[in-house]
Image: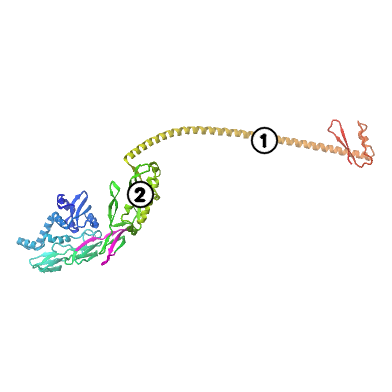
């Protein structure tokens, strides 16, 4: 923890310039030390994330809160802002008695003694500084405050005369009598001063987008949404605080816990955006503390409690994740780089199943990668890296995400890294392999050129053979056609000769038949005249006479066959019965 002395030694002027007094008193913080672009502030409630975010927005730099007690807070504020406080106190007393200040300086000292000291006035001064307008009010009204929405008060809330006290319009003061009773005086009004003491009442204003937390001395608590105002009355109020309503955008949600008054039952509900959320008394928001990366060069290294927030994001999201020191089956040590795309679909299931889904995703994805890598050697792993882009490879991741109310949309494999020695060996192997591939490519190109030449020669030879074959085929086809034409001509000639011979034969036969018919007719006429035809025909010119007689009593005819083809006539005799 930083001490007061350490903060004073760390350039108090710079600290007061970064953190003005009104910011320090209003938010009950004090600057301790400046660490680069981060300002370390001491606070009574360092776990208040909303206060840290609000201070970071006001101071326009990163803010870290550290625990200090109220005594150190008061001492530190007095030490850093004593010059501002001295000027405020002196101007307060002079403004209370402007006429008497020129005549009697002792009167001023008496007035300073009559009003509370710094220690007594500190709670009032802490509440005196006006609340910073919310972003919604600044957008609606600009830098100036709208009339009637807020009113500022000085230390006394009025002016002090010789015997009277005047409460200005729009101010309220708490008048304390000598017997200890108090009354509220609402301006504009002039009251008898006497021995009464007057203290300005702090005006707390909540603009649209803000709300007031009013805590009463009897233990009650009220939350008043803006626009609203409350004058702090120490008789009934324990404290009044202005806070900004939580802005919940679309696709965002917060988890709210509430406890019914007088019971121990705590209920949980979910508020979805877009909305301006103002908790009711007895309600608080669930604060999530998940694994997250450090950022910068170690943006993929997840650390516990690296992400502390209250608003859940319901839109699809993604994260980088590197799985280090993964061994293959041949003991090669690798680092696998992944990008995981996920989406929250069931908040209730997530709240019931896990307190850190990112940590569960990291562990499940690491387990899946270790299982996948352990089943492959280094060369096999390089051949199967495309499977690291498939959801089927991440069974534990998808299963755990479903149990936590999330859905894993996609896992992208971003490559791998190896140990320095293995990477060096791998680089050398890659270099040698690349050189061999270049040599092989060069030789392949030379061989391809030779193959191209040979293929061209073979193609030309084939073309020549094809042309020669086509020529021979053409010659053979012409010869066949010529031969066919000659055969057809010869067939036609022979057919013509045969036809002529047939016609000649027919004509000869017709002539012979006609001559034979004439002779038969002549012989028939001679026979009819009684001429012996045998004698007439032979006319003693026969060389040999053969007489054929039928048997006695024979009834069959006698037949004679002549063979004219023999050189000498031969006769065959036969008889048929």
The residue closer to the viewer here, 296 or 285, is 285
Taking the magenta stretch, the answer to whether it contains residue 244 is yes
Q: What residue sits right under mark 1 in the picture? A: 485
Q: Considering only order in the chain, which callout, 1 or 2, is on the residue closer to the N terminus?
A: 2
Callouts 2 and 1 close, C-beta under 8 Å? no
**Pointer 2: residues within 10 angstroms few (<14), some, or many (20+)?**
some
The spot of residue 157 in percent (x, y) is: 14, 64
The residue closer to the viewer here, 262 or 140, is 262
Disc 1 element: helix
Q: What residue sits right under mark 2 in the picture? A: 367
Q: Which residue does the image show at 12% across and 60% down from the upper left?
A: 119
Rendered view: 213 above or below 441: below
The total of numbered circles placed on residues is 2
Q: Is residue 527 left or right of residue 42?
A: right
Which residues are drawn in magenta?
A: 239-265
Q: Residue 244: in sight, yes or no?
A: yes
Residue 67: quarter of image: bottom left
Q: Which mark is residue 442?
A: none
**Pointer 1: residues within 10 angstroms few (<14), some, or many (20+)?**
few
Which label lies toward us, 2 or 1? 2
Whole-number angstrom distance, CA of label 2 to CA of label 1: 91 Å
Q: Residue 150: in sight, yes or no?
A: no
The spot of residue 285 in percent (x, y) is: 27, 60
Residue 66: quarter of image: bottom left
């Amino acid at each position: 923890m930083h001490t007061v002395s350490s903060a004073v030694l760390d350039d108090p002027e710079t600290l007061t310039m970064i953190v003005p007094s009104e910011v320090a008193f209003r938010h009950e913080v004090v600057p301790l030390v400046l660490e680069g672009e981060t300002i370390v502030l001491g606070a009574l409630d360092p776990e208040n994330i909303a206060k840290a975010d609000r201070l970071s927005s006001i101071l326009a730099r990163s803010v870290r809160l550290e625990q200090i007690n109220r005594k150190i807070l008061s001492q530190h504020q007095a030490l850093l802002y004593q010059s501002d406080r001295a000027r405020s106190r002196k101007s307060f007393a002079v403004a209370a008695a402007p006429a008497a200040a020129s005549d009697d300086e002792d009167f001023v000292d008496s007035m300073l003694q009559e009003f509370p000291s710094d220690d007594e006035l500190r709670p009032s001064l802490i509440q005196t500084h006006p609340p910073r307008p919310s972003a919604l009010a600044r957008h609606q009204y600009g830098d100036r405050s709208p009339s009637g929405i807020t009113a500022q008060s000085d230390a006394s809330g009025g002016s002090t005369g010789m015997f009277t006290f005047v409460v200005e319009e729009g101010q309220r003061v708490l008048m304390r009598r000598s017997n200890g009773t108090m009354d509220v005086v609402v301006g504009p009004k002039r009251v008898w001063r006497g021995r009464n003491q007057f203290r300005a009442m702090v005006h707390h204003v909540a603009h649209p987008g803000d709300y007031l937390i009013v805590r009463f001395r009897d233990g009650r608590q009220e939350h008043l949404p803006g626009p609203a105002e409350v004058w702090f009355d120490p008789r009934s109020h324990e404290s009044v605080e202005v806070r900004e309503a939580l802005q919940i955008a679309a696709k965002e949600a917060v988890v709210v816990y509430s406890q019914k008054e007088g019971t121990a039952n705590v209920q949980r509900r979910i508020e979805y955006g877009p909305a301006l959320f103002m908790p009711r008394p007895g309600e608080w928001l669930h604060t999530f503390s998940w694994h997250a990366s450090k950022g910068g060069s170690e943006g993929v290294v997840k650390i516990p409690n690296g992400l502390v927030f209250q608003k859940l994001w319901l839109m699809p999201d993604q994260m980088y994740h590197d799985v280090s020191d993964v061994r293959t089956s041949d003991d090669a040590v690798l680092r696998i780089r992944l990008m995981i795309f996920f989406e929250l679909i069931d908040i209730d299931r997530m709240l019931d199943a896990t307190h850190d889904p990112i940590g569960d995703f990291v562990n499940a994805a690491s387990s899946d990668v270790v299982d996948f890598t352990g089943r492959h050697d280094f060369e096999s792993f390089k051949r199967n890296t495309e499977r690291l882009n498939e959801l089927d490879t991440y069974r534990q991741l998808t299963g755990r995400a479903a149990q936590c109310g999330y859905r894993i949309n996609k896992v992208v494999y971003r490559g791998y890294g190896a140990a320095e020695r293995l990477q060096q060996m791998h680089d050398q192997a890659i270099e040698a392999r690349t050189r061999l591939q270049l040599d092989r490519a060069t030789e392949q190109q030379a061989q391809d050129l030779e193959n191209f030449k040979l293929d061209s020669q073979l193609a030309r030879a084939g073309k020549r053979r094809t042309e020669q074959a086509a020529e021979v085929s053409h010659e053979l086809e012409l010869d066949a056609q010529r031969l066919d034409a000659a055969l057809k001509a010869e067939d036609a000639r022979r057919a013509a000769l045969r036809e002529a011979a047939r016609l000649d034969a027919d004509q000869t036969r017709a002539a012979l038949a006609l001559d034979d018919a004439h002779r038969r007719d002549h012989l028939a006429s001679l026979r009819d005249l009684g001429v012996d035809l045998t004698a007439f025909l032979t006319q003693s010119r026969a060389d040999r006479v053969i007489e054929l007689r039928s048997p006695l009593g024979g009834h069959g005819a006698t037949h004679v066959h002549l063979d004219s083809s023999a050189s000498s006539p031969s006769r065959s005799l036969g008889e048929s019965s």
